[in-house]
Image: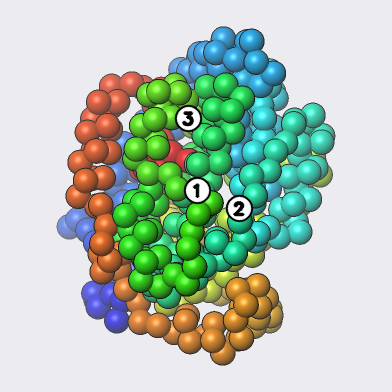
Amino acid sequence: MWNKREYQQCTYCVMDTTDPEIVFDENGQCNHCRAYLHRVQGLIYQGESSDKELQTITEKIKVKGKNNPYDCVIGVSGGVDSSYTCYLAKKLGLRPLAVHMDNGWNSEEAVKNIKTICNKLDIDYVSYVLNWEEFKDIQLTFLKASIVEMEIPTDVAIPYALHKVAAEYNVKYILSGGNLAGEAILPRTWFYYPKDSKLLKSIHRQFGTRKISSYPTFDYLSETYYKFIKGIRIAYPLNHTPYSKPDAMTTLKEELGWIEYGGVHHESMFTRLVLSYLQPLKFQVDYRKCTLSAQICNGIINRKDAIERLKEPSFDAATIEEEKSYVAKKFGLTLQEFEEILALPPKSYRDYPNNEKLLDFLYGTYRRLLASERSYHTAGYDSSHDA
């Protein structure tokens, strides 16, 4: 079994013992929403002070990029957060360059959204395309490793693409759609450091079938180079606005013709299968709990309604077999071969060589050094999630 704890759900939010390390107080309230209410609420939009912070950051970006055709880079996926970040950037008078990391899994809706957003906002766009055969091999190794963090190959390639393009165009700021309002609750047991190159290489050595020569890696050394040698910083403008995903979706639809495509991060065909089907069934990891819990803390939804939403299936039973067949075929597998991989017993990243202790020390030290900088807002956890 992935988790043998007796089931318990938080009395305030909807997080529960599907996080093996969750802690409840005497009132049954969990550590996730307590941390959000005590720490994160003071970091999200605070009215006039946040408006001033956004103005300060915007001016810094403009000054740093005044001699370049672009003053910032924005990673775009066709999703709500990145699309709204593009919209906000133009409202602020910035000159963004949109960058899409193409790993071969884009849904039609996502591709259309990217093109529509960039065209209507008059934003230049570049695509960083991965070598499919290499990327496919790496993705399959993570499926065979049977760990919950099956998206690490993509989560590593995205910051590489953004930093590489920013450096090429001498851009000093990357604008991230990450936001504390909706993403600050995420158990460590559900999401390990994607920048642990030792873990990635050890899994590929064990399960890979081909030599990797062009796949981009982005570890703490790469991050150090781009941050401190190239001077590239990541800003989180949505943390300085009264950001609401439902309101953002309405704005994008009405003003830019954005198309709704389903759940969070479902702009990728592979990610949709992982988040809605594989992780909930195999690991009891349902990311909807994180989103809904953050919304409860923000007053966007009440706990009763959140519980009702979680009663709805995380995937569409009418289309799931078709989705699995599509993914299996793209991997070059029969459906039976794919099902056999999915049925492998759950494991942990700790079952493979990794740099957890080193990264805990490095990023822990980095967070402490930056703790006094009020403008430094990550996407909700630590610097390892920067992109």
Q: Earlier in the sequence, mark 1 or mark 3?
A: 1
Image position, residue 367 (x, y; %): 28, 33
Residue assigned mark 2? 130
In space, the residues marked 1 and 3 are separated at their CA atoms by: 19 Å
Image position, residue 93 (x, y; %): 68, 18
Query: Mark number for residue 216?
Result: 1
Q: Residue at x 48, y 63 (%)?
A: 211
User: Can residue 236 be seen at all in this image of the molecule?
Assistant: yes
Mark 1–mark 2 contact, CB under 8 Å?
Answer: yes
Does 306 sit left or right of 125 as displayed?
left
In space, the residues marked 1 and 2 are separated at their CA atoms by: 8 Å
Query: Mark number for residue 234?
Result: 3
Q: Earlier in the sequence, mark 1 or mark 2?
A: 2
Q: Residues within 10 Å of mark 1 (few under 14, many from 20)?
A: some
Does 377 sit left or right of 316 as displayed?
left
Q: Nearer the viewer, residue 109 or 169?
A: 169
Query: Mark number for residue 117?
Result: none
User: Can residue 296 be seen at all in this image of the molecule?
Assistant: no
Q: Which of label 3 and label 2 is nearer to you?
A: 2
Q: Residues within 10 Å of mark 3 (few under 14, many from 20)?
A: many
Inspect the image, locate mark 2, and give the three-letter code of the amino acid beneath it. Leu
Q: Residue at x 79, y 39 (%)?
A: 256
Inspect the image, locate mark 1, and give the three-letter code of the amino acid beneath it. Pro
- In the figure, 315 relative to 152: above or below? below
- In the figure, 52 relative to 140: above or below? above
Q: Earlier in the sequence, mark 3 or mark 2?
A: 2
Q: Which of label 1 and label 3 is nearer to you?
A: 1
Image position, residue 13 (x, y; %): 38, 56
Q: Residue at x 50, y 41 (%)?
A: 160
Q: The N terminus lies in which quarter of the figure?
A: bottom left
Q: Secondary structure at mark 1?
A: loop
Q: Residue at x 71, y 60 (%)?
A: 107
